[in-house]
Image: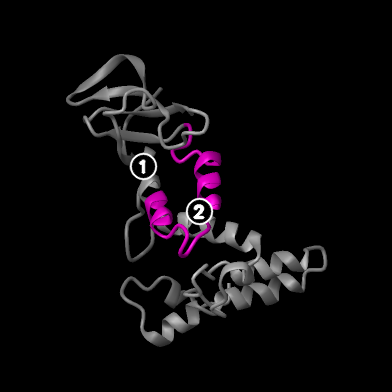
Amino acid sequence: MLVPVDILRKPGKLTEEEFEQIQKHPEYGFHLIKNVYTVSLIVANCAYQHHERLDGSGYPRGVKGDEIHYYGKIIAVADVFDAVTSNRVYRKAMLPHEGLEILYAGAGKKFDKQIIEAFRRAVAIYPNGLTVELNDGRKGIVSSQNEGIGDRPVVRILEEPNNKVVHPYEVDLRTDLHLLIKECLNIQENSLTL
Protein backbone atom coordinates (compact mmCIF):
# COMPACT_ATOMS: atom_id res chain seq x y z
CA MET A 1 0.00 0.00 0.00
CA LEU A 2 2.83 2.41 0.75
CA VAL A 3 5.38 1.33 -1.87
CA PRO A 4 5.10 3.53 -4.99
CA VAL A 5 2.98 1.88 -7.70
CA ASP A 6 5.51 2.69 -10.43
CA ILE A 7 8.07 0.56 -8.57
CA LEU A 8 5.61 -2.30 -8.03
CA ARG A 9 4.65 -2.35 -11.71
CA LYS A 10 8.11 -1.79 -13.17
CA PRO A 11 8.66 -4.42 -15.87
CA GLY A 12 12.47 -4.33 -15.77
CA LYS A 13 15.16 -4.80 -13.16
CA LEU A 14 14.85 -2.59 -10.09
CA THR A 15 17.58 -0.13 -9.18
CA GLU A 16 19.20 -0.48 -5.77
CA GLU A 17 17.13 2.46 -4.49
CA GLU A 18 13.89 0.94 -5.83
CA PHE A 19 14.68 -2.42 -4.20
CA GLU A 20 15.31 -0.60 -0.91
CA GLN A 21 11.79 0.84 -1.24
CA ILE A 22 10.38 -2.66 -1.79
CA GLN A 23 12.25 -3.92 1.27
CA LYS A 24 10.44 -1.38 3.44
CA HIS A 25 7.04 -3.01 2.96
CA PRO A 26 7.35 -5.38 5.98
CA GLU A 27 7.98 -2.36 8.20
CA TYR A 28 5.09 -0.45 6.62
CA GLY A 29 2.82 -3.46 7.18
CA PHE A 30 3.95 -3.79 10.80
CA HIS A 31 3.09 -0.16 11.56
CA LEU A 32 -0.29 -0.38 9.83
CA ILE A 33 -1.31 -3.61 11.58
CA LYS A 34 -0.03 -2.74 15.06
CA ASN A 35 -2.33 0.27 15.11
CA VAL A 36 -5.43 -1.89 14.57
CA TYR A 37 -6.59 -2.54 18.12
CA THR A 38 -8.59 -5.65 17.16
CA VAL A 39 -5.51 -7.43 15.74
CA SER A 40 -2.91 -9.12 17.93
CA LEU A 41 0.57 -7.60 18.04
CA ILE A 42 1.85 -11.08 17.11
CA VAL A 43 0.17 -10.67 13.71
CA ALA A 44 1.95 -7.35 13.18
CA ASN A 45 5.26 -8.90 14.22
CA CYS A 46 4.82 -11.82 11.83
CA ALA A 47 4.00 -9.44 8.98
CA TYR A 48 7.25 -7.68 9.86
CA GLN A 49 9.15 -10.99 9.70
CA HIS A 50 7.68 -12.60 6.57
CA HIS A 51 10.84 -11.91 4.53
CA GLU A 52 13.26 -13.08 7.20
CA ARG A 53 15.08 -16.37 6.51
CA LEU A 54 16.41 -19.08 8.83
CA ASP A 55 20.01 -18.38 7.78
CA GLY A 56 19.73 -14.63 8.45
CA SER A 57 19.76 -13.68 4.75
CA GLY A 58 16.31 -12.09 4.82
CA TYR A 59 15.11 -8.59 5.58
CA PRO A 60 14.35 -6.11 7.14
CA ARG A 61 16.43 -7.05 10.19
CA GLY A 62 18.37 -10.14 9.09
CA VAL A 63 17.20 -12.17 12.09
CA LYS A 64 17.57 -15.95 11.91
CA GLY A 65 16.46 -19.28 13.33
CA ASP A 66 14.43 -19.06 16.52
CA GLU A 67 14.53 -15.25 16.40
CA ILE A 68 11.77 -15.59 13.79
CA HIS A 69 8.31 -16.28 15.21
CA TYR A 70 6.88 -19.65 14.17
CA TYR A 71 3.94 -17.93 12.46
CA GLY A 72 6.39 -15.69 10.60
CA LYS A 73 8.08 -18.84 9.26
CA ILE A 74 4.69 -20.12 8.07
CA ILE A 75 3.86 -16.82 6.37
CA ALA A 76 7.29 -16.82 4.67
CA VAL A 77 6.57 -20.18 3.03
CA ALA A 78 3.09 -19.13 1.90
CA ASP A 79 4.38 -15.76 0.66
CA VAL A 80 7.15 -17.26 -1.47
CA PHE A 81 4.80 -19.85 -2.96
CA ASP A 82 2.24 -17.15 -3.78
CA ALA A 83 4.90 -14.83 -5.23
CA VAL A 84 6.45 -17.37 -7.59
CA THR A 85 3.13 -18.89 -8.73
CA SER A 86 1.59 -15.50 -9.55
CA ASN A 87 2.07 -13.55 -12.76
CA ARG A 88 4.22 -10.46 -12.36
CA VAL A 89 4.88 -7.64 -14.80
CA TYR A 90 8.46 -8.88 -15.14
CA ARG A 91 7.80 -12.65 -15.47
CA LYS A 92 5.20 -15.35 -16.04
CA ALA A 93 3.97 -17.38 -13.08
CA MET A 94 5.69 -20.66 -12.30
CA LEU A 95 3.66 -23.85 -12.10
CA PRO A 96 2.69 -24.83 -8.55
CA HIS A 97 5.07 -27.82 -8.46
CA GLU A 98 7.89 -25.49 -9.54
CA GLY A 99 6.97 -23.19 -6.65
CA LEU A 100 7.28 -26.16 -4.29
CA GLU A 101 10.72 -26.91 -5.74
CA ILE A 102 11.81 -23.34 -4.92
CA LEU A 103 10.73 -23.92 -1.33
CA TYR A 104 12.42 -27.33 -1.11
CA ALA A 105 15.63 -25.82 -2.51
CA GLY A 106 15.68 -23.56 0.55
CA ALA A 107 14.52 -26.18 3.08
CA GLY A 108 16.59 -26.08 6.25
CA LYS A 109 18.56 -23.05 5.08
CA LYS A 110 15.98 -20.41 4.32
CA PHE A 111 12.70 -22.12 5.25
CA ASP A 112 11.62 -24.57 7.93
CA LYS A 113 11.43 -28.01 6.27
CA GLN A 114 8.58 -29.22 8.49
CA ILE A 115 6.51 -26.18 7.52
CA ILE A 116 7.17 -26.87 3.83
CA GLU A 117 6.08 -30.49 4.30
CA ALA A 118 2.91 -29.44 6.12
CA PHE A 119 2.21 -26.85 3.41
CA ARG A 120 2.61 -29.47 0.66
CA ARG A 121 0.21 -31.86 2.43
CA ALA A 122 -2.37 -29.19 3.24
CA VAL A 123 -2.55 -27.21 0.01
CA ALA A 124 -4.21 -28.29 -3.21
CA ILE A 125 -1.33 -27.44 -5.50
CA TYR A 126 -3.68 -27.87 -8.47
CA PRO A 127 -7.15 -26.88 -7.12
CA ASN A 128 -10.39 -28.40 -8.38
CA GLY A 129 -11.65 -26.63 -11.47
CA LEU A 130 -8.20 -25.67 -12.73
CA THR A 131 -7.72 -26.29 -16.46
CA VAL A 132 -4.46 -28.12 -17.18
CA GLU A 133 -2.47 -29.69 -19.97
CA LEU A 134 -0.67 -32.97 -19.34
CA ASN A 135 2.76 -33.91 -20.69
CA ASP A 136 1.12 -36.21 -23.28
CA GLY A 137 -0.87 -33.31 -24.76
CA ARG A 138 -4.24 -34.15 -23.22
CA LYS A 139 -6.17 -31.29 -21.63
CA GLY A 140 -8.68 -31.39 -18.86
CA ILE A 141 -9.92 -30.02 -15.59
CA VAL A 142 -8.74 -31.03 -12.13
CA SER A 143 -11.78 -32.86 -10.75
CA SER A 144 -10.64 -34.08 -7.33
CA GLN A 145 -7.72 -34.32 -4.97
CA ASN A 146 -5.73 -37.22 -3.58
CA GLU A 147 -5.45 -36.63 0.15
CA GLY A 148 -1.93 -35.76 1.21
CA ILE A 149 -0.68 -35.65 -2.40
CA GLY A 150 -1.71 -32.19 -3.56
CA ASP A 151 0.57 -32.30 -6.59
CA ARG A 152 -1.00 -35.49 -8.04
CA PRO A 153 -4.75 -34.80 -8.52
CA VAL A 154 -7.41 -36.54 -10.59
CA VAL A 155 -7.92 -34.86 -13.99
CA ARG A 156 -11.08 -35.15 -16.10
CA ILE A 157 -9.84 -35.37 -19.69
CA LEU A 158 -11.87 -33.25 -22.11
CA GLU A 159 -9.53 -32.97 -25.06
CA GLU A 160 -6.90 -35.19 -26.63
CA PRO A 161 -4.31 -33.92 -29.11
CA ASN A 162 -6.22 -32.96 -32.27
CA ASN A 163 -9.38 -34.60 -30.91
CA LYS A 164 -12.28 -33.40 -28.75
CA VAL A 165 -13.34 -36.09 -26.29
CA VAL A 166 -17.00 -37.08 -26.63
CA HIS A 167 -17.11 -38.96 -23.32
CA PRO A 168 -14.87 -37.30 -20.74
CA TYR A 169 -12.90 -39.67 -18.55
CA GLU A 170 -10.64 -39.32 -15.55
CA VAL A 171 -6.97 -40.07 -15.05
CA ASP A 172 -5.50 -40.32 -11.57
CA LEU A 173 -2.01 -38.84 -11.41
CA ARG A 174 -1.43 -40.70 -8.15
CA THR A 175 -1.43 -43.99 -10.05
CA ASP A 176 -0.51 -42.82 -13.58
CA LEU A 177 2.99 -41.78 -12.57
CA HIS A 178 4.16 -41.22 -16.16
CA LEU A 179 1.72 -38.30 -16.44
CA LEU A 180 2.63 -34.81 -15.28
CA ILE A 181 0.87 -31.48 -15.38
CA LYS A 182 2.81 -29.55 -18.01
CA GLU A 183 0.87 -26.30 -17.93
CA CYS A 184 -1.97 -24.54 -16.17
CA LEU A 185 -4.26 -23.01 -18.76
CA ASN A 186 -6.18 -19.78 -18.46
CA ILE A 187 -9.87 -20.81 -18.60
CA GLN A 188 -10.69 -17.77 -20.77
CA GLU A 189 -8.09 -18.81 -23.36
CA ASN A 190 -9.40 -22.27 -24.09
CA SER A 191 -12.70 -23.89 -24.94
CA LEU A 192 -12.74 -26.83 -22.53
CA THR A 193 -16.09 -27.41 -20.88
CA LEU A 194 -17.46 -29.98 -18.51
Q: Residue furthest right?
A: 37
Q: Quadrant of the N terminus?
A: bottom right
Q: Residue furthest bottom?
A: 17
Q: Position of residue 70 (x, y in %)?
A: 64, 60
Q: Estimate the spatial distance between the alpha carbons at disc 2 and disc 1, rounded to whole Å.
A: 31 Å
Q: Within 10 angstroms of label 1, few (less than 14), some, or many (20 or more) residues? A: few
Residue 104, above or below 191: below
Q: Nearer the viewer, residue 89 or 125?
A: 125
Q: Secondary structure at mark 2?
A: helix
Q: Position of residue 20 (x, y in %)?
A: 47, 83
Residue 159, by quadrant, is top left
Q: Residue furthest left?
A: 162
Seen at 53% across and 55% down, the residue is 78
* Span colored in magenta: 99-128
Q: Within 10 angstroms of label 2, few (less than 14), some, or many (20 or more) residues? A: some
Seen at 42% across and 60% down, the residue is 106
Q: Position of residue 165 (x, y in %)?
A: 27, 17
Please give left or right for residue 175 compared with residue 39 in the image: left
Seen at 33% across and 22% down, the residue is 157
Residue 41, above or below 92: below
Q: Which mark is residue 186?
A: 1
Determine which residue is flagged by label 2. Answer: 113
Please give left or right for residue 190 compared with residue 151 in the image: left
> As shown in the figure, which amino acid type bears the numbered disc 1?
Asn
Q: Nearer the viewer, residue 128 or 81?
A: 81
Please give left or right for residue 159 compared with residue 45 in the image: left
Tell whether position 118 is magenta.
Answer: yes
Q: Earlier in the sequence, mark 2 or mark 1?
A: 2
